Amino acid sequence: MRSVIVFALFALGAAVMVPRYAALLGKGPAPVAMAAHHAAPGESSPANFRSLVVPRDERGHFQVDGRIDGRLLSFMIDTGASVIALTARDAARLGIHPAAREFFAPVRTANGTVRAAPTRLDMVEIGDIAVRDVAALVMPEGALGENLLGLSFLSRLRRFEYSDGKIVLEQ
């Protein structure tokens, strides 16, 4: 019976996540995305959903300013990152100072595997969108050029999608 419940939970999770990833990979829109409302930056969408439209920057990336526990930080939206990844410098600005022994989580990056320090962030805010108790990693000094807004934040939204050269976040 326990294995049936575990399988059912796995199937439910897959049913929710696969359409989102398919839409992000350009395999076609997810059913949720079909009812998308493309709000102007900072504009609220129908039914009191909060939306934010993020255009590409001059490098072709999606940069956003946000707040972690009330402190301003810049992020690059990275749908390929499992969690929020913080530079060591910005983590220190937030008062997060992991000891050397806390850098135990292996992380595969484009430059190879490094060990990062897991942490939790009380509040992450991007525009009017706020998510509490978010998993994050502090990357070792020099391993990361900028903070990444990964799936530990994005997956907690009602939806996120790439559309018309922009990323839409909706809570």
Image (cartoon, grey):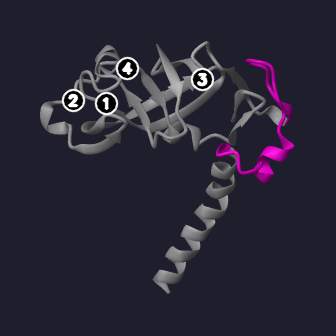
Asked if residue 37 is among those painted magenta in the image, a careful observer would answer yes
Residue 143 location (% of width, % of height): 29, 27
Question: What amino acid is labelled 2 in the image?
Answer: Pro
Question: What amino acid is labelled 1 in the image?
Answer: Val
Q: CA distance from mark 3 to mark 2?
A: 28 Å
SS at circle 4: loop
First along the sequence among labels 3 and 4:
3
Residue of label 3: 62
Residue at 49% x, 41% y is 152
- For discs 2 and 1, the disc positioned in front in the rendered view: 1
Residue of label 1: 138
SS at circle 2: loop
Q: Are marks 2 and 1 in contact (CB under 8 Å)?
A: yes
Question: What amino acid is labelled 4 in the image?
Answer: Gly
Q: Which residues are magenta?
A: 24-46
Q: Main secondary structure of the magenta part?
A: loop
First along the sequence among labels 4 and 2:
2
Q: CA distance from mark 1 to mark 4?
A: 12 Å
Residue of label 4: 145
